Amino acid sequence: MKYFFILSILIFSHNSIAEEKKLEHFCKMNTKFYETDKNEWSQKIIDYDFYVLNNNEIKVLDKETKKYLYSFKIILNNNRVLVGYFSDHKMINIFTFNKITKFAKYSNTYFDEQGGGQIGVGKCFTKTI
């Protein structure tokens, strides 16, 4: 009976961990950006995938570079919206996903010697892993 209990806990734990990453979204964002504060705005479409990890961070993959952006700490996650941010000594990044309209917004602002930043808005679609 003791082994059955331990086995049940292990199976339940494994399933809970596996469930966390099953819901992933694909977003196509119309993005405006500038490399430094002195540059003109540029524009392009950037494709992102994102998912929630451990109910406390948002992982965002830039499909073009195949690199993850900084992990966003979740500050709001309910049935209407998902909001996360990352900040350090030179930048702040914000990611929001409106669960009702299925639109996401990603922005970053650099406050180092160069400056620069970007804002992207786009429709997201659910994908199942």
Image (spheres, helix red, strand yellow):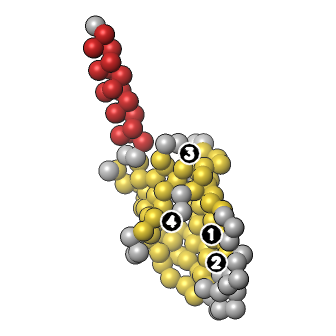
Residue 26 lies, in percent from the top left, at 42, 61
Residue occupying the point 60% across, 52% down = 73
Numbered disc 1: secondary structure: strand
Residue occupying the point 60% across, 81% down = 33
What residue sits right under mark 3 in the picture?
56
- Residues packed near mark 2 inside 10 Å, few (<14), some (14 to 19) or many (20 plus): many
Residue 2 placement, left or right of 69:
left
Instruction: Specify the amino acid type for callout 1.
Output: Ser
- Residues packed near mark 4 inside 10 Å, few (<14), some (14 to 19) or many (20 plus): some
**How many numbered marks appear?**
4
In front: 90, or 63? 90
What residue sits right under mark 4 in the picture?
69
Of circles 1 and 3, which is in front? 3
Gap in angstroms between the C-alphas marked 3 and 2 = 25 Å
Return the disc, 2 or 4, that comes first in the chain's sequence.
4
Q: Which of the numbered marks, if any, corresponds to residue 107?
A: 1
Is residue 62 visible to the viewer in this orientation of the structure? yes
Return the disc, 4 or 1, that comes first in the chain's sequence.
4
Residue 108 lies, in percent from the top left, at 63, 71
Residue 86 lies, in percent from the top left, at 62, 60
